[in-house]
Image: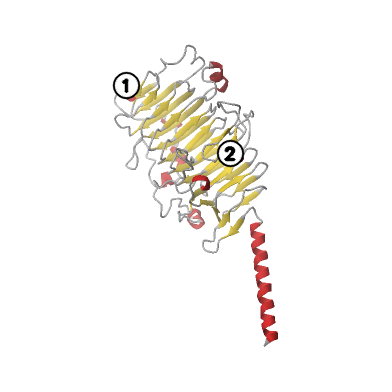
Amino acid sequence: MKNRFKLMSLLLALGMAVSFSSCSEDDDNNGDDNNNDTGNVIVTENITENTTWTSDKVYQLGGRIVVEAGATLTIEPGTIIKGEAGTGVNATALLIAKDAKIMAEGTADAPIIFTSVADEITPEQVASGDFKSPNLDPTANGYWGGLLVLGNAPISVAEGNSAQIEGIPSTDTNGRYGGDDPDDNSGVLKYISIRHGGSNIGEGNEINGLTLGGVGSGTVIENVEVVANQDDAIEWFGGTVNVTNAVVWNAGDDGLDADQGWNGTCENFVIVSPDDHLFELDGIEGNTEDPSEIQRFGSYTFRNGYVIANTDDATSSDLINLDPETSVHFENIFFTEIAEGQQITLKDEATLPDGFLDGVSTTFTDVVLNVTDVEPFIDGTASGISAGTAPADASAIDITVFNWTWADQAGAIVAW
């Protein structure tokens, strides 16, 4: 009897040793582990070496996960990433630090989806071509953080050439961005959908759906959707990166936001009913009394856009909120579903010092408002804005490229 008990104890100890050894192997993979309840791969530690996430698994962010300098995160088409709930310093997010890269190249048939653990979407559903959430409303926001990409391209800030990105606590030095390399390359984002994010880390400090801080022109960003983010859908903080084919829907704050002397182009895009401004556009934050600082950073461009100002889900505030020192060009933009009182707000230039706006180039070319008279909808003086029922060049705005998005599958993108 005693020998049998010893044998059973030995076998039990051996089994436990094998079990712990197996767990240790999983934990050694950048903090990834399998959760027996969900089957998701739980990611709990920063990514410090080249890592690939595959489409046969769901990756669950167990906190703020950083791809650190020198590492590349590759995400296969059709992969789902889900963020856990959390606010303050515990807000979940995926942060691509300076000198790191993300290679997230989805396809129209297999987009990469960033969402919340509350979202019941599965790889099988995505593989079937259905990209809608099966249980969350497209207005549900603030469930997790968002995706932040940081780089070494120039930014205009009050001191120096770098800053701490909004939404990341100052104690995390991986949140630094900005530099002197306009051609910096942070990787590739193609066919990605970011949903239900925007956790608050402090008073007035939420995480954007897609944050681009000092991202350089070597980075490729094409075919991006942001749905139901509590803060802005996409925000540029300086940098030189271009974005092509973007759709933002039901942002809790602004649709598209630019700050700190961004110098790039957003082309072929759709904005649908944010809660605040459709566009919130600022210029430099450096020496605002020196016109040469404005000239040094240049201007940015929004080209070929379709803007749906209001829906049953949300009513936006200003159409465009624009500081006078903002150098920006609007080309072939069509606004529709405009409500009384909504305006393109051009802030008063009379209070600015002489010569302050030397070098500022803000232009409107073929901007059309679907109203009978544009004058009540413009606060200030601007040319190049007219009334009409269709874009000036409808053929240049291709909304068919968005047929892979949740917004399109839900019928939110209705042609003019």
354 shown above or below 132: above
Q: Which residue is mark 2?
A: 175
Q: Which residue does the image show at 58% across and 45% down from the upper left? A: 104
Three-letter code for the amino acid on which mark 2 is drawn = Gly
Residue 344 x, y percent position in the rendering:
37, 26
Is the residue marked by circle 2 packed among few (<14), some (14-19), or many (20+) residues within 10 Å? Answer: many
Q: Secondary structure at mark 2?
A: helix
Q: Earlier in the sequence, mark 1 or mark 2?
A: 2
Q: Which residue does the image show at 44% across and 32% down from the upper left? A: 305
292 shown above or below 248: above
Q: Which residue is mark 1?
A: 375
Q: Nearer the viewer, residue 255 or 306?
A: 255
Q: Nearer the viewer, residue 220 or 114?
A: 114
Q: Secondary structure at mark 1?
A: helix
**Residue 15's quadrant in the figure?**
bottom right
Residue 53 x, y percent position in the rendering:
60, 52
Q: Nearer the viewer, residue 411 or 4?
A: 4
In the image, which disc is placed on residue 112? none
Q: CA distance from mark 1 to mark 2?
A: 43 Å
